[in-house]
Image (cartoon, grey):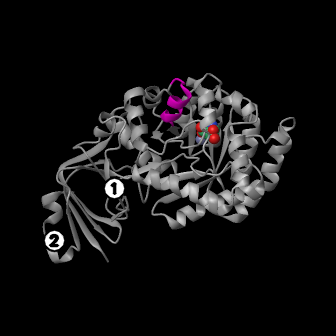
Amino acid sequence: MITSLFRNAAIYTPASSQTPLSGDSQGKVDSIARGALLCRNGLIEKIGEEHAVIKDLSLYDVDIEIDCEGCCLIPGFVDPHTHICFAARREREFSQRIAGTPYLDILRAGGGILSSVRAVKEASEEELFQTTLENVLSALSFGTTTIEIKSGYGLDTETELKMLRVIDRIRRETPLDVAITFMGAHAVPHEYKEDPDTFVSILTDEMIPAVAKQGIARFCDVFCEEGVFTLQQSRKILQSAQKHGLKPRIHADEVYDTGGAGLAAELQTVSAEHLLAASERNLKAMAEAKVIANLLPATAYSLRKPYAPARRMIELNVPVALATDCNPGSCFTESMPFVFGLAVMNMNMTVQEALVASTINAAWALEMQHSVGSLEVGKQADFLLLDGDSPAILAYHAGVSPVVSVYKKGVLVA
Ligand SMILES: N=CN[C@@H](CCC(=O)O)C(=O)O
Ligand SMILES: [Zn+2]
């Protein structure tokens, strides 16, 4: 049993709540100007005003004592949407995009996601593990202590199962908590271009049952988008996933409004992703169905698209979470501080709203809110020390990471 005391910290954490924070509560943050946190065996045993935490504490009870020197202490980031398991970067495609070729045109011509599929098929399982590990450790250094990782660069049963094994190895061999999502419905493979319904049948009749049997993935995601999967196909895929015990989530209305947000509400998915082009009517339906909006501002930045209407979502009472979307194509960043800065500066979220969105609401989006996402007694001692005295530093000190130390279950990991 290791006991560590972190004292003299400016602590900021989302307020305790039985539901994701939304509307007026989206920015509900508790702060303690001079706080302390006592961690025993990886869990938070006490947290509060320093004098209250250390009262009655014999120094013999403490193995490690750290003076945080007034630094800001926040929960570790939870990144609820990544495609961080990939074999090769797509720098050439980035140059094409910034020269004006649309993202979906590159995919339609057999590049984009499909070029990542070729790279993953060619890579050995060990090579794929090593590239993923490098990316994930980079995310950890930016303060991500819990991460969601999707498959989706396999698009056939064998390669999808290979990706899921690699992601599971990341879960076992790194300090991070990892939520695992199957995304065989990420693109239509070239050979089914003329007959996408046959590929949908392969997904529902072969791939989803095989993934469920493998037992690694918890969630199933689909790219519902013009020229990718239609609303009807997405519904079929997600209903099949539900039948096999996988929880649905959906890439909805990223480029065009195809009604994906409405489908998320209809199926009561745990979250809907992107939502740059979602209609007002479907956002209202999401609020009603309590679907979390996973917003990915670094993708809007990288695709040079208008940002998702975060303010309107908050007005409508849709709980907002933030994620990197780290992937080799539409958005290559592992940095939650970058995402935080974009949310505050370009989506007009307050610092408090962004803190909630990148911690507890993101944990809700992964159904991990009981163990991570806020600093409460009994939860894991996952937290960050920042080079500043409030979380505003994450937006204020632009282009750098103010994350000085990363603690996972009370242990310094980056
Ligand atoms: N839009 C679909 N999927 C990813 C991009 C994946 C890629 O381009 O490789 C996304 O969420 O942005
Ligand atoms: Zn994505």
- The quarter of the picture showing ligand 2: top right
Per the image, the residue denoted by label 1 is: 383
- Look at the image and say whether residue 305 sits in the magenta stretch: yes
Q: Position of residue 176 (x, y in %)?
A: 46, 60
Q: Does 204 sit above or below residue 284?
A: below
Between 334 and 203, the one nearer to me in the picture: 334
Q: Does 250 sit above or below residue 46?
A: above
Side (left or right) of 410 relative to 128 = left
Side (left or right) of 82 relative to 27 = right
Per the image, the residue denoted by label 2 is: 57
Q: Position of residue 202 (x, y in %)?
A: 82, 50
Q: Are marks 2 and 1 in contact (CB under 8 Å)?
A: no
Residue found at x 53% / y 34%: 299
- The answer, for residue 207, to whether it is visible in the render is yes
Side (left or right) of 387 relative to 311 = left
* Magenta segment, prevailing SS (helix, strand or loop): helix
Residue found at x 37% / y 31%: 344
Of labels 2 and 1, earlier in sequence is: 2
| Quadrant where the image shows the N terminus | bottom left
- Look at the image and say whether residue 360 sits in the magenta stretch: no
Tell me the kind of residue under disc 2. Answer: Leu
Between 96 and 159, the one nearer to me in the picture: 96
Residue found at x 68% / y 29%: 104
- The answer, for residue 216, to whether it is visible in the render is no
Q: Position of residue 271 (x, y in %)?
A: 56, 43
| Quadrant where the image shows the C terminus | bottom left
Distance of label 2 from label 1 (alpha carbons) = 22 Å
Q: Does 22 sit above or below residue 373?
A: above
The stretch in magenta equals 296-306
